[in-house]
Amino acid sequence: MHGGSGAVHCHLAVISARAQGGSAPRPAGVPRDIWGADEGFSLSERAGLRRVRAGFEENIMIAIIFEVIPAEGRREEYLDIAAAMRPMVEEVEGFLSVERFQSLTTPGKLLSISYFEDEAAVARWRCLHAHRGAQSRGRAGVFSDYTLKVCHVIRDYGMFERAQAPQDSLAEHG
């Protein structure tokens, strides 16, 4: 995790507090009403996730942002591999969704955003034999370049699903 020393520290504090039978300190930036609330808040139904408090403690939704530039003449091969992987990832326990996009600013760059319930689900996908094979094919020549970002989703809200919206946004826009 790049630049994530605070997040790592927070995670270690949670583990340490639990090992001692206590509760973890509230991480910086996490509102008191979310961290301490017994009922928590429901995340959007489309993500099918647990309440926010549990998420901050251990079940944070993960977004995988995969940016790839296929090698010259191998774009369709990459898309075929991705299409073959889709039914497999959909069977992974904890998989939520995946979307693919084409960059408007970088010619040839494709983007895949996948969502998983937690890090255990990401590990199940990452270690799936067929996925490992697809990774090897990509690194062996299908990809000219790629970057992979694994991110914790802090909030998940939209125009109409507002339960996760920050208080200032709710005050301004409802």
Image (cartoon, helix red, strand yellow):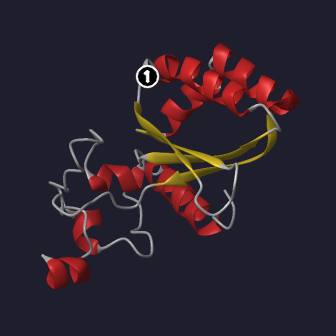
Picture quadrant of residue 23? bottom left
Give amino acid for label 1: Glu
The residue depicted at 18 percent of the width and 85 percent of the height is 172
Q: Where is residue 119? Give x, y as percent.
A: 52, 39
The residue depicted at 67 percent of the width and 67 percent of the height is 3
Vertical comparison of 29 with 15: above or below: below
Query: Label 1, on which residue?
Result: 90
Q: Where is residue 34? Give x, y as percent.
A: 25, 65
The residue depicted at 70 percent of the width and 48 percent of the height is 108
Could you tell whether 61 is left or right of 80 in the image? left
Vertical comparison of 21 with 106: above or below: above
Could you tell whether 169 is left or right of 88 in the image? left
Quadrant containing the N terminus in the rendered view: bottom right
Could you tell whether 114 is left or right of 54 in the image? right
Residue, far right: 140
The residue depicted at 12 percent of the width and 75 percent of the height is 174
Which type of secondary structure does the marked residue at label 1 adopt? helix
Give the crowd class for mark 1: few <14, some 14-19, many >=20 residues within 10 Å: some
Could you tell whether 173 is left or right of 90 in the image? left
Q: Where is residue 140? Give x, y as percent.
A: 87, 28
- Report how many numbered discs are placed on residues in the image: 1
Vertical comparison of 83 with 43: above or below: above
Q: Where is residue 60? Give x, y as percent.
A: 42, 49
**Viewer-proximal residue, 76 or 85?**
76
**Viewer-proximal residue, 44 or 67?**
67
**Viewer-proximal residue, 27 or 68?**
68
